[in-house]
Every structure is written in structure tokens, then in C-alpha cells.
Image: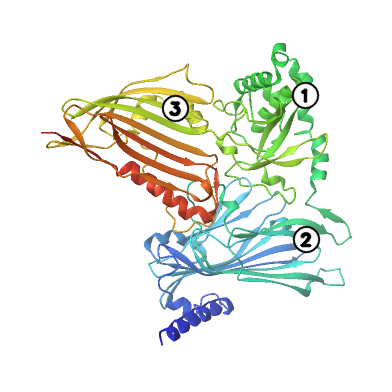
Amino acid sequence: MKNFTALLIFLLVLVGKAATAQSNHTYGQLNPEEKSFGAYEADTTAAAVYLYERGDNYFDVDGSRIWLYKKYHAKIKVLKEEGFDYGTISIPYYRGESTSEKVMEVRAMTHNGTVRIGVEQNQIFNKDLGPNWSEITFSFPKIQVGSVLEYTYLLRSPYIYNFNGWDFQESIPKVYTEFNASIPGNYYYNRALIGTLTLAVNEAELEKGCLRVPGISKPADCEKLRYAMEDVPAFVEEPFMLGTRNYKSRMVFELAEWRKINGEIERFTQSWEDVDKEMRTDSDLGRQLKKETYFEKQVPPTLLSTGEPLERARNIYEYVRTHFNWTGSYGVSLNSRVKDAFDQGSGSVAEINMTLINLLNAGGIPAELVMSATRRMGLPKRSHPVMSDFNYVLARAEIDGKTYYMDATDKYIPFGMLPFRCLNYYGRVMDFENESYWEDFNIESRNQVNVRAQLLLEADGMEGSGVMYWLNTGYPAVDKRRKMAEEEDYQEELEEGFREDIEVTSLGLDAEKSTETSTYERLDFRMENEISGDRIYLDPFLIRFFSRNPFTLNQRTYPVDFGYARAYVYSLSITLPEGFTVESLPEPLMTALPDGLGHLMYKVEERGGNVLLTFNFNLKTPHYTSELYPALKSLFDEAVRAQTQSLIVLARGN
């Protein structure tokens, strides 16, 4: 009987989903499943959920031209008061110089049980957002927990390249989301499904005579598409990830070819061979990399001739990094003019790094331009050139058999390292003599924060004093140097990271032990201890690398990307006051990730009148798959627990 009941419930769920998918969904009406929808069991934390969402994209003739139409219909259930935020809707549209998009047939209403409250036309507003963008915006009335917010609209666009796909995943979950399209045969679009979720519906068929154009006797045939997903989880951003566009589940369309009525073919997608050829003569890239003679006259002659190649490359890099101030502008070209930028001492990413390439080549060090994208931008497509995927330019050189990537826009980045914003897997090396090619970045792997402390407790145990040696290498050292240079009161900012019972009495950077890729500091400190009777209760972590777990999701469907491998090492030696003995120490801990990709080792022991603590947390790769997320989350849990819940108890002897 129990098995039969479970089967019946399962079948009812399937029937409910089928009803959601197949219902007519006339605007203004809720089907029985939508009326009775209560909690969303798949995600009880959700503040709201899409009960139904559908988009229809198609082409039609109006007047003398073919337009792209986008019809949209959605129903959102408010589950908590936080879901009221989804009651304000914005529909952006583009305005060109000669023609514009238009949002039409906007209708919206709030369903509160059997009561329906519509949005009046005078409550729908048109706002300018900038030179070329506007939005239609409105808010639903009388929202309460349990409301269903329904709206629909039609967007008409003259831009056929604006047929750009469908977002299946948003910041709240979706019970059902469907995208339909009808594409005339003379338009060809590349398409790709992004993200890890799979389609519940994936249909394509030929639709005869779908589009009639005045003056053309034969109607066009269309490709008719239908894609859908069910029970789509909310996309929740967590720390340590690339741009969301890499991971949110969506169907992407990109116009590749347009066969015009007169038989002419206009191609929008090129091959890399085409791109290479264009860039060799492009005024913003190819020709800007042929200014070696100009730069030879602008810099000290010894800069381009002194030292071995590696030393010379370092000196050229340092010269460019010092000479320029970065304007903050990204982009591959941005109308780059390296001569003007050099004269002004400021420039975009492209202008600064193309100057660097010119000077390296002038110095007899063959250098190439690398097109890449920042972490927030996302990963460029490898399958074919999409120039809008790139927003960064780097320099590349091979010296004594080793490959170096350079970016002279950041004052604190040493030679051979890239700013954190650029740690994005790979780039396209533009070899204008041969052919361009993809290449993975070699990222600095020696990134460590190493803190070694010594603590001497006074005779009564109430106070203690000590010294802390703080070594940062790699990217932590870059961050440290930036803070030292930019913080008004670096010591005060540093002390805020310590516990309240610790006072830094002196702080200094050891210049002799520090290098361009490392910082070595000495801190002297005093601290107070908690005493109860004859016992001292000592928190051994004078500093904490992190006091909370950055990973909080039950499930993460996209990879964890730290940018670079990293290690945190902390050691403490406590000299006990005379008459005190150890009563209890924290339990040792040793745990590791699969395949040796990371580990945590924590040990506290008594040895020769001292208490010795060692904490070693090591992440050996920058990238972890979503399958490893539970293990990684657990490893961080253990590391946080060790740093925040450790206690050493010392007792005074009789």
C-alpha cells in the first residue's frame, strides 16, 4: 500500500508538470495547479518562484521591412515578503539613430486568490537610461505573500542580430520555462546551451510557408524550435567564480549568416584566418604594433640594449609600468593610439600593453599580443571568433625557453605575473607572422601566507608578549604591498584583523628579506588571557585566515575558481610560565581532498615546556569541479572550526 501511495504521488507530480507545460495559459487566468501552489519543496529558501514562463521569438513583415518580434509571458508566485522585490519589472529596449525597438501590448495583474488587480496604463512608465537605451517599468499593486504576479508584453526589433536566446535560469527557481522560435531559412544562427542543466524539451521541425514578404511570390520556410526546462534551481552567486555568463543555464543564439532576397550573402561569423588577416592591417591593432622606430627614439638607448634578454625584458616592463597610468578602460581596441597615449602618460589596457610589445620587439625580444577576457567577463568561445568575448590585451614573450605573460597596467604586479582580474584560463595569441592560436596561461603557483609566532606568558599568566613573523609570497604579497601603499594607516587597518585582546606594539617590513614577489614583516605584540581560578584559557589563533566558510550552498552547479593555488600556514610556540602545566589541548586534525588536490593538517602538542601549534591549509589547484564542492565545503568547515573553536587550558600546579 505504501509503495502504491508513493507511485500515485509521483504520477500526480508528473501530471501537474505536464499540465503546466501543455495548458493554454491564457493571460489573466490561473490553472488549478497554479491556484493551489503552496510551498516550493525543491527550494524552501526561495522568496518567489516562476510558476510559468514562456517566450516566443518570430519574424514578420510590417510596412516595408522584416521585424523581429519577442513575446513574453510570466507568472511569479510570491512565497515570502522578500519576494516583494520581484514585483517591480523593467523591460529594456534599444533606440538607434534611425530606427528603434518598441515595447507594445504590456499587460500586468496581481492575483490574490480570486481577486485580480490590474496595472493601469498610466502606471506603466517609459524611462531613458542613456544615449541609446530606455526601459518600460511598472510595479504590481497589492502584493502579499501568496500573490501570483502575471505579466506579458511584445517587443518589436529591427535588429535581426538581437535574436539572442533565452535565460532558463535566474535568481529565483522556475517550475517551468519554455522558449519557442520560428526562424526563416535565410537567417542562420549558431546556437549553444550554456550551463550544466539539461533540456526537458528539445524539438526542431520545418514549418512550411511561415513568412510572406510582399513582392516575393514564394513564402519562406522556417525552422521551428521549442526548448523547455522543468524545476530549474535558482542561480545563486557565491565567492570564487568567473562571470555568471559562463554558468547560468541559457540558450545562446548568434547570427552567423544572412541570405538576402537578391541572393547576396552577408556573413557575420568569421574564421580565425579571416580575423588574423584583418588584424594585420587594422589601425587599432595590427598597425599599432609597428611603432618600434617611434619608441626607440622616445626611451633611453640603454633600456633596449643593456643586459641579457630576461634582464632587458624586466627593465622594459618596469619602464612601461612606471611611465603609464591606466585610465581604467578595457577593450581590445577602443580606437587605440599608442603614440598619443605614450605622450600623455596614460592609456587603456590595449594602449599600455601594445606599447610594451613595441618596446620589447625594439629591444630584440620577440613579443606578441594576446587577446583575453577578464574573470568577470567570462571565458571566450574556442569554437569560432566572437570578438565581443574579448575585453583585454596582454603581452607575451618567450625568453630562454620560458613563456612570460605581462600586463603593465598595475603598479604592484611584478614582471611575469598577471593581475587577478586576468586569471581566466586562456587567451588567443595573435601571431601575425603565422597563425593565431589558443594558449593556457601559466599562473604563479607559489602563493602562500605563512605566519610564525612566538608567545611568552608572564609569571601570573594574565598577560603575554611575543613576536610574529609574517611572510607573504605570490599574489598575497601583491595584495600586501597594495595595502601598504594605499592604506592611510596600514598598522591600524592590520590591527583590525586581530582579536580585541591583542595590541600590536611595533610593525616593520624587512626590506632585505622581502623581494618583488614576497613581503616579510615583523610584528611585536602584547595580549591578555582569560583566567578563571588557577586556569588559563588560551585561544591559540592570534590571527585567523578566515573565520567563516565562504561556501554555504547545499549544492553548487558551477565550478569553484580561486584564480590561483594557495596555502595558509600558521605556527605558534608558547613558552609556559613556571608552575603551569598543560591540562588540555585541541584534538589533532588531518583531512584531505580527493586526488591530493588539497589538505588540512592541524596539530597541537607539548614539548619541553612549550606548546607547539601547526596549522597548514593547502589548496593545490586554482580550479575545482562542482562535483568536488561538498568535499571542499567540508574542508573549509574543518578549517574554520579549528581557527575559531580551539582552546588551550593551562593549570597552575600545587
Q: Amino acid at mark 1?
A: Lys
Quarter assignment of residue 178: bottom right
Q: Are marks 1 and 2 in contact (CB under 8 Å)?
A: no
Describe the element under mark 2 as helix, strand or loop: strand
User: How busy is the neighbourhood of tag 3: few (under 14 within 10 Å), some, or many (20 plus)?
Assistant: many
- Nearest the viewer among 318 and 443 is 443
User: Image height check: is 121 above or below 26?
Assistant: above
Q: Position of residue 225 (x, y in %)?
A: 70, 69
Q: Amino acid at mark 2?
A: Tyr
The residue wearing badge 1 is 291
Describe the element under mark 1 as helix, strand or loop: loop
Q: Amino acid at mark 3?
A: Leu
Q: Position of residue 53 (x, y in %)?
A: 56, 68
User: How busy is the neighbourhood of tag 2: few (under 14 within 10 Å), some, or many (20 plus)?
Assistant: some
In which quadrant of the rendered image does the C terminus lie? Answer: top left
Q: Are marks 1 and 3 in contact (CB under 8 Å)?
A: no
User: Residue 165, labelled with which disc?
Assistant: none
Please name the residue shown 60% across and 20% down the image.
322
Q: CA distance from mark 1 to mark 2?
A: 40 Å
State left or right for residue 654 relative to residue 457: left
- Nearest the viewer among 492 and 85 is 492
The residue wearing badge 2 is 188
The residue wearing badge 3 is 471
Task: Point out the tag, 1 or 3, that comes first from the N-terminus.
Answer: 1
Q: CA distance from mark 1 to mark 3?
A: 42 Å
Q: Position of residue 162 (x, y in %)?
A: 69, 56
Task: Point out the tag, 1 or 2, that comes first from the N-terminus.
Answer: 2
